[in-house]
Amino acid sequence: MDEKANNPMAVLPVNRLMLKMGIPMILSMVMQALYNIVDSYFVSGIADTAQVTGLGEKALTALTLAFPVQMLIVAVGIGTGVGTNALLARSLGQGDREKAGRIAGNTFFLGGILYAAFPLFGLFGVRGYIATQTEDPVVLQMGLEYLQICCVASMGMVSFAVFEKLLQATGRSQLSTIAQISGALVNIIFDPILIYGWLGVPEMGIRGAAWATVLGQIVSALLAFFFHLRYNLEVTIRPADLKPDGRLISGIYQIGVPAIIAQALMSVMTYGLNLILMGMSPNAVTAYGLYYKIQQFILFAAFGLRDAITPIVSFAYGMGSRDRIRAGIRYGMRYTLVIMLAGLIGLELLASPLSSAFALSGYTMQLCTLATRLASLSFLFAGINIAAQGVLQALGCGLRSLVLSLCRQLIFVLPVAWLFARTAAADTLVWLTFLIAEGATALLTAVMLRQVYQTKIDLLH
């Protein structure tokens, strides 16, 4: 019996498949964004001491400075998972379950290797990294305490990124969402307990936020691992599959490295913008950090749909189905645009209430509101660029996907922001950087998609 006949990736109408896979992935990514904003909400309420005033806002600044490294850890895990996702889905689309098992086994091996690097940075590199962005001793110490814990105990973050993609590659994204939501709930519950010292627990301040975060990540990883063993029956991993296979690892990273770099560019962009904005004022850094975490609910939702586009188009490409590839691109673009437009409207209407939810000074709150309203205009173009990256990764055009990431997160961002930050109207102009970057990248995206249609898709029968 043909296994594809019962595989929803092969037979379910693409629009329904996109929603079936995409909605859980969107929820999963929104939960990931929730991790970031929950810590910020609770640490903003840290009370002042006799020695330090504005301690909550300093804690928010410390989280903003630490955030690029957290994104880098996620980037390595997600990038490895994206390569596994596309390669595994393609193998299953070709009916090669033996190869799928070897791919999954090698991914387990890679996850263990990847984790080993981050504790070393946590122990020996964090202080120097934070010190490049601030001279405030309070912010430096808080950033050091928070980031060291997140790096040393990053096994949950790395492991979940890998197990999540294994579940998504087989169309079981709802299970990864359950794992993600469970971890987020653990984080929400333990944040106030550990930060403020509730229920008889010692008050830990910003260190409590870090421990709540890593505890939630570990819970998510354990659940995702259980779901993989219990439900991913198409992917059978034998002990021999854990042995490193150079060809498979190379195949994973031919797709995954561009994805890692694309995700890591978020870290580079945020780090670079932290330095640029610190030249304006620490208030601008805090405002940008909060805006970035607020808008992640929208961007991460688009990333979730992108992660549904990739296996759907990749599976169809493995089948050689031109119609399903075209449908995957068409519905992926439409649904992503709906997400971005809804997000734009929501942030324009709620910019002020969202900013006022945190314990900010008046000037910082004004900057955060302005940043939210102006920077969110970039959503008009960002959805096209994000969906296109998923399509290009699925079709093996990782280099093109990487070029788009470089443009929208680096080449068209940092130089423009640097120039705007030196103008008399810097407080306003600097937030338009994102609109300019996404708009310019969208033009390049249109050219690339046309080339891919002509050289890959239209040649299929």
Image (cartoon, grey):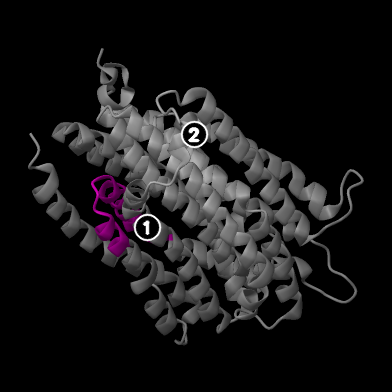
Q: Which of marks 1 and 2 is nearer the N terminus?
A: 2
Query: What amino acid type is highlighted by mark number 1?
Result: Val
**Mark 2, residues whose alpha carbon is within 10 Å: few (<14), some, or many (≥20)?**
few
- Residue tagged 2: 239
Q: Is residue 338 visible?
A: no
Q: 71 left or right of 247?
A: right
Query: What amino acid type is highlighted by mark number 2?
Result: Pro
Part of the protein shown in magenta: 376-404
Q: Quadrant of residue 43?
A: bottom right
**Residue at (7, 34) in percent of width and height:** 461
**Residue at (49, 39) in percent of width and height:** 164
Q: In which quarter of the image is residue 190?
A: top right
Q: Main secondary structure of the magenta part?
A: helix
Q: Is residue 449 visible?
A: yes
Rendering coords of residue 437 (x, y %): 34, 68
Q: Is residue 381 magenta?
A: yes
- Residue tagged 1: 257
Q: Is mark 2 on a helix, strand or loop?
A: helix
Q: Which mark is residue 159?
A: none
Up the image or down, 146 lies above or below 346; here it is: below
Q: In which quarter of the image is residue 47?
A: bottom right
Up the image or down, 457 lies above or below 20; here it is: below
Who is closer to the viewer here, 237 or 2? 237
Rendering coords of residue 181 (x, y %): 59, 37
